[in-house]
Amino acid sequence: MKTIVGLLLSLGLSNVVLAEENPDWYLAGHLGVNHLSSWPAAVDFGGVGATGHLALSRGSHAGLMLGRQSEHARLELELTQGRFRIERMELADVSEAVSAHGKYQAVLANLYRHDALSRDWRAFAALGLGWGKVDLPGLQFSSGCACLGDASRRGAVYQGRLGIAYQPADADAVALQASYLSLPGPERAALPSVHYGRRGVTTVTVSYTHYF
């Protein structure tokens, strides 16, 4: 259902962008930080279950975009990825510090609405829908139990974005933007199996756009 809605929105905005006079193609890139505080997990030992979570810290986020922009609309394809640090793992009443990293990648179609605040400044908002993957490394407690981590999953992703852009010249612009990206929950089928729920990551990035 989400895919159908996203496709209809994409087609609708695409028609709007192409219908307006002199739409501009552009290339853009953005770089910044992400934030994930924790990722809850459910572990199954083969009939016996336990809950836990990974404690996470700030990581890096980056992306490349190709799109077409008209006076008030923008249609964009984005390739984005991020990396975050895992600082602690907890399962039932056992908690241990770790040092490891997880990562994610996604391809999204973003639909923007943007309006001028002044001659050089614009505000924008966007919704995105796409496909992505999350990978978590194998983690082992000092007892020898490899209960958490070593999990991955591909699935639908979606995001919302707000930002403000400064464009002092026709061909170049910079922007500050905040996004919320919803990721699929990674899982591992082999016992002890583990399932992580869907999780959202917030990002703050600075972007540079070149129009041609």
Image (cartoon, rainbow, N blue to C red):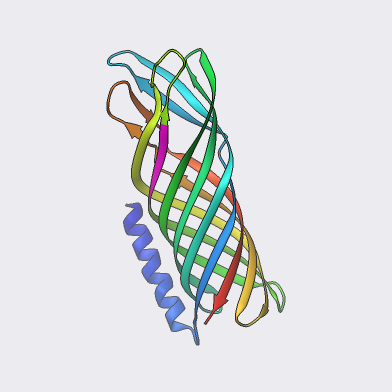
Residue depicted at 32% across the width and 52% down the height: 1
Spot occupied by residue 154 in the image (x, y as percentages of width and height): 33, 45
- On screen, residue 122 versus residue 28, left or right, reads right
Q: In the rendered view, would you say 20 is above or below 30? A: below
Q: Nearer the viewer, residue 143 or 42?
A: 143
Q: In the rendered view, would you say 2 is above or below 96? A: below
Q: Is residue 5 magenta?
A: no
Spot occupied by residue 121 in the image (x, y as percentages of width and height): 69, 72
Residue depicted at 39% across the width and 37% down the height: 185
**Residue most toward the bottom?**
21
Q: Does residue 35 appear anywhere in the picture? A: yes
Q: Quadrant of residue 58?
A: top right
Q: Is residue 134 magenta?
A: yes
Magenta residues, start to end: 132-137
Spot occupied by residue 71 in the image (x, y as percentages of width and height): 56, 79
Q: Nearer the viewer, residue 162 or 142?
A: 142
Residue depicted at 54% across the width and 37% down the height: 85
